Amino acid sequence: MKGNELVRAVRKSWQSQPTLEGAGVHLRRGFGFRETELVDPFLLFDDFRSENPADYKAGFPWHPHRGIETITYVLDGDVEHQDSMGNRGVISTGDVQWMTAGSGIVHQEMPQGDARGRMQGFQLWSNLPRTNKMMDPRYQEVKQAEIPRVKTAGGASVRVIAGEIEGVRGPVRDVVSDPEYLDVSLPAGSSFTHPVPADHNVFAYVFEGEGRFDAAGPRDFGDGEVVLYGTGSQVVVSTDKKAVRFLLVSGKPLREPIAWYGPIVMNTEDELRTAFAEFRNGSFVKKR
């Protein structure tokens, strides 16, 4: 294939929707249960941002996870967390927590905001394949200073959380779905061209400004929109008179059956029932 035949076109797009989660956190859901086949291996994507502490202070009190990974990326404010393995800490502005729940973890996440009451961040859920559903839980917690920033020839500034761009690798590694997670800032009148594995599903989430994510498309995409790409081996984004900032995420699809209820995602209904029975009887957490 040559030229534009390699470039991924936009397959589908939609607007994130207001949702209440946890103990009453106001957020915008980019995708969830109904989009699993489209975004495999990813399951859920939430955008939480507010300057009103009443929108987020109730947080996400103690709850279990099994069979997935949760990726929390904070742009502004603090999120306090603790878990059943004795871990506790704070992720702050620019930090990332990549948590592999594996066989089971019980934790809580409590957004605190910054000194002005502002809180902004994202949480992405990535599925684990059958062979890794019951792996030992682990964290890859990355501070802002550890995340490299790359300036591209086209004018983009990219924070590389996972994956690689222009020979620079992100700090999150050894993840089963071989993901890429980039935070891309593109000034007005510039472009961003990036190779992506042909066998990966790829989506972008716009959270500032607007840009052209498909050269042949009818319009630009703006704040709060999910842009799902079709097939190809390259993504091209450009801007005209406005800047744009977006997340670009890709991962290798699992193509496995999904049994999902609340914070637990397994392959069969029997596995799901077992997980909740273990949570009730106190045997859910396998490693402390």
Image (cartoon, helix red, strand yellow):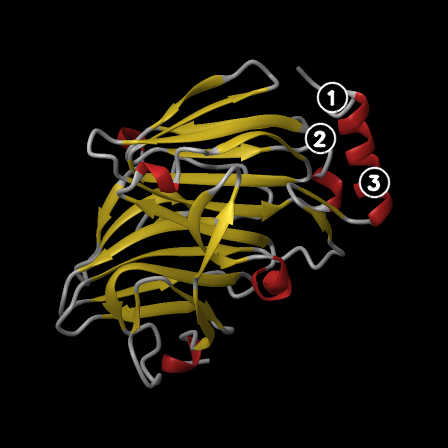
Task: Specify which label sits upstream in the sequence, 1 or 2.
Answer: 2
Crowding near the residue tagged with mark 1, few <14, some 14–19, many ≥20 C-alpha atoms within 10 Å: some
Q: Secondary structure at mark 2?
A: loop
Q: Are marks 2 and 3 in contact (CB under 8 Å)?
A: no
Discs 3, 1 touching: Cβ within 8 Å:
no
Name the residue beneath numbered marker 3. 273
Kindly indicate the quadrant of the structure image that contains residue 40: bottom right
Q: Residue 147 bears which disc, if any?
A: none
Position of 276 with respect to 199 (left or right) is right
Q: Amino acid at mark 1?
A: Lys
Q: Nearer the viewer, residue 246 or 231?
A: 246
Disc nearer the start of the sequence (2/3): 2
212 left or right, relative to 139? left
Position of residue 115 in the picture relative to residue 219 (left or right):
left
Mark-to-mark CA distance, 3 and 1: 16 Å
The residue at 84%/36% (across/down) is 274
Label 1 sits on a secondary structure element that is loop
Q: Residues within 10 Å of mark 3 (few under 14, many from 20)?
A: some
Q: Secondary structure at mark 3?
A: helix
Q: Which mark is residue 286?
A: 1
